[in-house]
Image: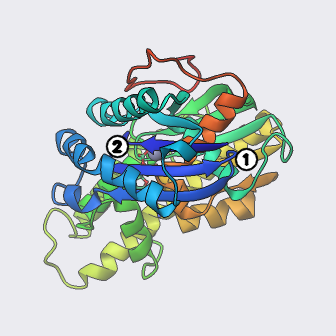
Amino acid sequence: MKILGIETSCDDTAVGIVEDGRNIITNIVFSQADMHSEFGGIIPEVASREHIVKIVPAINKALTEAKMDLKDIDALSVTCGPGLAGSLLIGVNTAKSMAIAAGLPFIGVNHIEGHIYATCLEDVDIRENPGFPLISLVVSGGHTDLILMKGHGDFQIIARSRDDAAGEVFDKVARVLGLGFPGGPEIQKVSVKGSLLKPEFPRPKVKNSMDFSFSGLKTSVVRRAELMGVYPNNSIDNIDQKIADIAKSFQDAIVDTIVRNTIGAVKKYKAKGLIIGGGVAANKLLRDVFAKESPIDLFIPRPSLCTDNGAMIASAAYFRLKNNLAYQWDLDVYPSLRIDASK
Ligand code: KG4
Ligand code: ZN
């Protein structure tokens, strides 16, 4: 079964075609990062206008690369939430119109579910290996969620960020350090030249909870940047080294915090496997530390499948369809959609 997946929840216009939930036929991503970097963050109105311009070319490019037309596609799927309302609308309305015109099944997918199923694109059958229950960590620009998964479509959020999402903190710290957008890859790049600062940044912990809270860490980074003369002015000597040191020390602290809570959840729920997804899962240090520390089988898709893409939506849609979890024709956009809600 070949499913075309459309993803427009944030600032990427993405279209993927996937066979049987696992084999990527094509995966096209038109990024808007250059457009938003001018402002240091995503401007929702700019994002939705750009989706309007890019969505049809992205679909055409995916079909052309796959040497297919709509007659070769068995179902259409789209992210219906969570995300920016204006951006989601472009994807949902496009997919719905195409499905009606072509008489194809139409499946709405939760974006977070897509990040989890990206792992299946690495030829993993999660029901067989590792099997349920699973713990899934989704770390992206909008979410830091720990999810207990007891079966396909059976999700329970067991912890989340009480304030900023992990990716959001990477982006904000990068802005303070005068680095580009999105901040995660920039911080990773400059960290290579950095040394760990003493005293180290805090590893915030929420009392009696596995929830995350990053605001204290963020404030600490801003204070240190001020003390070291890197922020708000950045015309001091040896600035590049100081920026690299702060970036590396911040990356170290946030990765430590994320790994600590996640491993805690794995042990508490006696999970058989750990799946990690979302843009921040592309981070090399995060991947390395999880590989070292995870007490159970670890699944992290390649970096290009961690960041937003259409193939992950098509994969999640395949398992929804197989398990009769498809959404209906009255599907709308749900900007605050939870993964543990039926809609
Ligand atoms: O999943 P994603 O592509 O979009 C959302 O659903 O938000 O995640 C984007 C986030 C951004 O905040 C970006 O800075 C972060 O993922 N990111 C990274 C890396 N690559 C992307 N963070 C840390 N290290 C990276 N290599
Ligand atoms: Zn995402």
Work out how far the residue at label 2 is from the one at label 1, CA to CA, in angstroms.
26 Å
Relative to residue 31, is residue 298 drawn left or right?
A: right
Q: Residue at x 57, y 16 (%)?
A: 342
Q: Which residue is mark 1?
A: 274
- Residue 252 locus on image (x, y percent): 52, 63
Which image quadrant for residue 75?
top right
Badge 2, how many Cα within 10 Å: few under 14, some, many 20+?
Answer: many
Q: Residue at x 34, y 61 (%)?
A: 183
- Residue 23 locus on image (x, y percent): 67, 55
Q: Is mark 2 within 8 Å of ligand 1?
A: yes
- Residue 308 locus on image (x, y percent): 46, 50
Nearest to viewer (mark 2 / mark 1): 2
Depicted 262 relative to depicted 269: above or below: below
Query: What amino acid does circle 1 point to?
Result: Leu
Q: Nearer the viewer, residue 181 or 108?
A: 108
Q: Residue at x 70, y 45 (%)?
A: 20
Report helix, strand or loop for mark 2.
loop
Q: Is mark 1 within 8 Å of ligand 1?
A: no
Residue placed furthest toward the front = 71
Numbered circle sitting on residue 38: none
Sequence-wise, the earlier of marks 2 and 1 is: 2
Q: Which residue is mark 2?
A: 10
- Residue 311 locus on image (x, y percent): 55, 50
Q: Residue at x 60, y 63 (%)?
A: 302
Relative to residue 41, is residue 161 drawn left or right?
A: right
How many marks do you count on the picture? 2
Badge 1, how many Cα within 10 Å: few under 14, some, many 20+?
Answer: many
Q: Nearer the viewer, residue 9 or 148?
A: 9
Report helix, strand or loop for mark 1.
strand
Query: What amino acid does circle 2 point to?
Result: Cys
Q: Nearer the viewer, residue 108 or 300?
A: 108
